[in-house]
Image: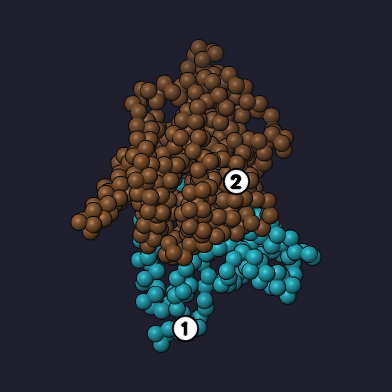
Chain colours: A cyan, B brown
Amino acid sequence: MNGESYQMLYAILCYNDEDMVGSWSKEQDADVMKKLAVVQDKLAKQGRLGPVARLLPTTSATTLRKENPPLVLDGPYAETKEQLLGFYLIDCNNLDEALDVARDLGAANPGGAYEIRPVGMFAPGGVAK
Amino acid sequence: MSDTAWIDAALTSARPQAVGALLRYFRDLDTAEEAFQNASLRALKTWPQNGPPRDAAAWLIMVGRNVAIDEVRRNRRQQPLPEDDRAISDLGDAEDEIAERLDGSHYRDDILRLLFICCHPELPATQQIALALRIVSGLTVKQIARAFLVGEAAMEQRITRAKARVAEANVPFETPGPVERAERLAAVAAMIYLIFNEGYSAAGDTAEIRKPLCEEALRLSRLLLRLFQSEPEIMGLTALLLLQHSRSEARFDKDGALILLDDQDRSLWNQKLIAEGLALIDKAMRHRASGPYQIQAAIAALHSRAAKPEDTDWQQIDLLYGALELMQPSPVITLNRAVAVSKVRGPEAALEMIEPLAPRLSNYFHFFGVRGAFLMQLGRNEEARVAFDRAIALANTSAEAAHIRMHLDKLMRDSQATKISKK
């Protein structure tokens, strides 16, 4: 990390109205991405930017409820009584493989749910932690 | 993004839900549209100052309803009410309340109904499409007229007539039962596919003009999938549109002539759309409930997965077309299958497969194009030339004709080359 050491890694989770973002024209989308890239580049140069991912739309999401036996549902995780506690990025050939991993994780730590969502854009980034 | 750009995006995305709910409320399409229009005008006035509401659709429904009710009252009393912004100033609390009442299942059927009324079976396909683009997507008559290459007045008339038909049809406003809902869903899916094809089958100069139709169909398909998350055929439809649309930058040369799949520059394919399409097929497959859209999407996916044309899994494509033939027997599907067969078992087997189709496809451009190509591969050049001539006569677009002419030129060159070598 360029010799400097920071105190803490922070995850920044992005929320917005998917309908609306999906209605952006290609130009609007590109415009926003360009502005974001300026901010990201600055962080990257400082060695402070970790992985950045843009997820595919929630229509491509599948949810595994960690019940016994686990229950697979189409669509994103929609309940509000649980909170987001963490995430994994895993490399798979298809959704079935991703679900198998989720089932293994769920067996190790039952309760709650996993939302499985394909990643559309991924920049690995690099923080030295 | 400028002020108006984000408001436009918010209005566009809220439109199906808002117009759908207003239609349920007023039970009249014109009133619902006008109410939405009025609410949008207020949004343009107040949103830049107050910021976007938490739930844009709920806001528009609330304001649209209030304005329309005020108007009815005003007309009834024949006396002007004060030009009040009461409806808007109250919105803080009212919005929460209405958002709660607009529970998910209700607005799902609102949007489905709105799409479904455009699919009236008596309306010809082009009118269904025009109506959906106007009512659901909110495209202006001018934009739609441009996409259909007709005058604005003609399109206005077409839409007005279609609306009158729809009004007579009396689509029920009660929440549909499961069977009816499934029927509506299938009709709407077919219409969305029509919208897409209207854009996709365009060529040359019109391809660029009609591209928004493909984008709109994709947006509607995604919307439908968000409402019906566990429907494998809606996943299949969305995947199919994504995968076909992913090739749009590679489908035409600079002169507007169609480039066939084998000859496309695959680096121009949009990998983001492909990734989304493949993810959706993956999801659909888990349901083990196959259907025509899923199979077509799976065929498109096999093309998308091939980095080079020679990597294409034609054997699998042949099998998938076989399954599609069983589900939806059609000479056009057999014709498509024959192309896969020609790659797996050679042109002779493929030609044999399509010969019985001749009586039913005697006026079908692609039949003669494909037949000519098989004959050419077999070296039966004279017969190929006859088939290509017939194809040109039946071509729907100049791009189609130009493509066949390319084959003819090649035949001509080949035969000249043979003559010269014989001398």
Give the residue displayed 41% in from the left and 42% down from the top: B368
Q: Amino acid at mark 2?
A: Glu
Numbered badge on residue B170? none
Residue B50, by quadrant, is: top left
Give the residue displayed 44% in from the left and 34% down from the top: B363
Q: Residue furthest front?
A: B423
- Which sits in the foreground, B422 or A68? B422
Q: Amino acid at mark 1?
A: Ala
Q: Is residue B169 above or below residue A44?
A: above
Task: Answer left or right for B355 relative to B150.
Answer: right
Numbered badge on residue A128? 1
Task: Answer left or right for B260 relative to B14.
Answer: left
Do we see residue B167 in this rendering?
Answer: yes
> Real-space Cα distance between discs 2 and 1?
57 Å
Q: Is residue B70 above or below residue B274?
A: above
- Which sits in the foreground, B359 or B404? B359
Residue B330, by quadrant, is: top right
Badge 2 is on which residue? B325
